Amino acid sequence: MRLLIVEDDGPLAETLASGLRHEGYLVDVARDGAEALAWLHDNDADVVILDRDLPVVHGDTVCRALVAEGNPARILMLTAASSLDSLVDGFDLGADDYLAKPFAYVELRARIQALGRRERAADGVVGASILERGDLRLDLRRQVAEHRGLPLQLTPKELGVLRELLVADGAFRTTTNLLDAVWDDPFDRSTDVVKVVIHGLRRKLGDPDLIETVPGFGYRIR
């Protein structure tokens, strides 16, 4: 697996690169957003480890650019902020995962491995399958969701949660159900991450609120 680390903290970037190379990854390093975009224009990466607060070109701008051009690299955003709003903002940019600083190296490694497994699983999808409930429609093969005929710009986690809620066909899915089905990272299994994704889904689906929450039962599509 080939990785690009985009981090302006030189010692941190080199420490991460050295450790990941020792694990067998091919690792390149960019020190600012402009250098990262230039590198990605000429090279392919499986996972981009992207610091959010970058000089020259901000990490948010880099993330938006990669998503807009359809770059297949998975994006793991690093940030010093860990609030709920910051997490939602990061996922709204199109990042596949989000890791708040400071973090343990083993946690970063687990996130990278999880993103790599998700990529291989997506490559292996065969056949076509459509899930529908009311005005919601999810094409599992294309990983495209629509509401009232309009496309929804959803993150991979939001797509995963929406899939589970649609498969339930009106039944409840608990937080544990959603974690087991959508989160394969042992370091990211908490009720907070589910709340972040549900919050993002609600915001994108708009009014009226289609996701019902019942304490003790979980979530379902109304």
Image (spheres, rainbow, N blue to C red):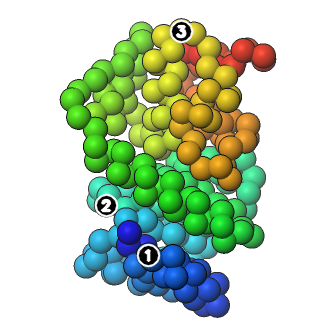
Task: Name the spot of residue 19 as percent of width and height, x first.
Answer: 57, 81
Q: Is residue 140 above or below residue 209?
A: below
First-in-chain label (2 vs 3): 2
At numbered mark 2, what does the secondary structure look like: helix, strand or loop?
loop
The amino acid sitting under disc 2 is Asn
Task: Quadrant for the N terminus, please.
Answer: bottom left
CA gap, disc 2 and disc 3: 35 Å
Q: Is residue 118 above or below residue 154?
A: below
Residue at the image point whose x is 54% and y is 33% from the top: 181
Residue at the image point whose x is 52% and y is 21% from the top: 165
CA gap, disc 1 and disc 2: 20 Å
Pick the front one: 137 or 203: 137
In the rendered structure, find residue 73 and report the number of the disc placed on it.
none
Q: Are marks 2 and 3 in contact (CB under 8 Å)?
A: no
Residue at the image point whose x is 30% and y is 21% from the top: 130
Task: Name the spot of residue 35 as percent of width and height, x first.
Answer: 41, 84
User: How dense is the environment of label 3, judged by Cα within 10 Å: few (below 14), some, or many (20 and up)?
Assistant: some
Mark 3 or 1: the one toward you: 1
First-in-chain label (3 vs 1): 1
Residue at the image point whose x is 25% and y is 79% from the top: 42
Task: Name the spot of residue 122 as percent of width and height, x first.
Answer: 33, 45
Q: Is residue 121 above or below residue 203?
A: below
Disc 2: which residue: 71
Disc 1: which residue: 25
Disc 3: which residue: 170
Task: Quadrant for the C terminus, please.
Answer: top right
At numbered mark 3, what does the secondary structure look like: helix, strand or loop?
loop
User: How dense is the environment of label 2, judged by Cα within 10 Å: few (below 14), some, or many (20 and up)?
Assistant: some
The amino acid sitting under disc 3 is Gly
